[in-house]
Image (cartoon, rainbow, N blue to C red):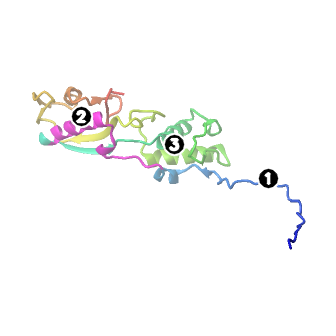
């Protein structure tokens, strides 16, 4: 014998749409500097430029100079934070005019314009920004290295062709670096790249 069971379906009376949890945007400030970290490793450079930069630095060290690599690859998110904190700090852009970037949940606008600018200034200081950072640069393309070079004046260094060059002034390294495919951006003291930009 078959029994038929019927169940009454209670219609859903809650018509509130489902809402995904959206995290609140985090106010700008120096605490952002630890997010999206950059690299100071030559291993994070694009292969072709990495080989040239490694050889150039090796030549400096073999000549008795010292090299401290400060930055190589910079994630686009970090470049975004650096670029716009500098723009706000310099007064070139209002905090409310900064375009959003997917994945960077930052709120540039504080309670007052002065507070917004102070937060941007704190970021600029924490990043150690000296020159206005580009939004897209050779760093974001893995084709630049920021480094300080000391102890090389008066030393003899080999360029990529094997020729010995006496370094009488720091600018003598520009041609040596270029022989390795590492070009100096003169306006930015620590910056070298694959194309001089």
Q: Which residue is located at x 85 percent, y 55 percent?
A: 15
**Mark 3 or mark 1: whose residue is earlier in sequence:** 1
Q: CA distance from mark 3 to mark 2?
A: 29 Å
- The 10 Å Cα crowd at callout 1, few under 14, some 14 to 19, many 20 or more, is few
* Quarter containing the N terminus: bottom right
Q: Position of residue 141 (x, y in %)?
A: 40, 35
In the rendering, at what x and y percent does residue 81 appear? Answer: 51, 43
Q: Is residue 43 magenta?
A: yes
Q: Secondary structure at mark 1?
A: loop
* In this picture, residue 182 sits left or right of residue 96: left
- Disc 3 target residue: 81
The residue that disc 2 covers is 52
Q: In this rendering, which labeled residue sits more in front, label 2 or label 1?
A: 1
Residue 17 numbered tag = 1
Q: Which residues are magenta?
A: 36-61
**Most frequent secondary structure within the magenta stretch:** helix
Circle on res. 148: none
Residue 106 % position (x, y): 59, 47
Mark 3 or mark 2: name the one nearer the start of the chain. 2
Q: Where is residue 108 drawn, in percent x and y?
A: 61, 44
**Which residue is painted at 50% across and 43% down in the image?**
77
Left or right: 152 in relation to 22: left
* Distance of label 3 from label 1 (alpha carbons): 34 Å
Quadrant location of the C terminus in the rendered image: top left
């Amino acid at each position: 014998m078959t029994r038929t069971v019927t169940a009454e379906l209670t219609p859903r009376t809650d018509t509130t749409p489902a809402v995904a949890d959206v995290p609140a945007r985090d106010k700008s400030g120096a605490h952002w500097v630890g997010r999206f970290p950059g690299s100071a490793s030559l291993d994070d450079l694009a292969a072709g430029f990495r080989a040239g930069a490694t050889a150039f630095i090796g030549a400096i060290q073999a000549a008795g100079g010292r090299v401290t690599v400060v930055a190589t690859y910079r994630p686009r998110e970090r470049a975004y934070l650096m670029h716009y904190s500098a723009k706000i700090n310099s007064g070139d852009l209002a905090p409310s005019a900064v375009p959003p970037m997917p994945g960077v949940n930052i709120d540039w606008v504080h309670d007052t314009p002065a507070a917004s600018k102070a937060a941007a200034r704190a970021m600029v200081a924490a990043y150690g920004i000296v020159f206005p950072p580009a939004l897209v640069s050779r760093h974001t393309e893995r084709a630049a290295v920021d480094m300080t070079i000391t102890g090389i004046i008066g030393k003899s260094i080999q360029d990529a062709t094997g020729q010995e060059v006496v370094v009488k002034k720091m600018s003598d390294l520009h041609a040596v670096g270029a022989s390795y495919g590492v070009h100096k951006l003169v306006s930015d003291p620590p910056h070298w790249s694959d194309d001089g930009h």
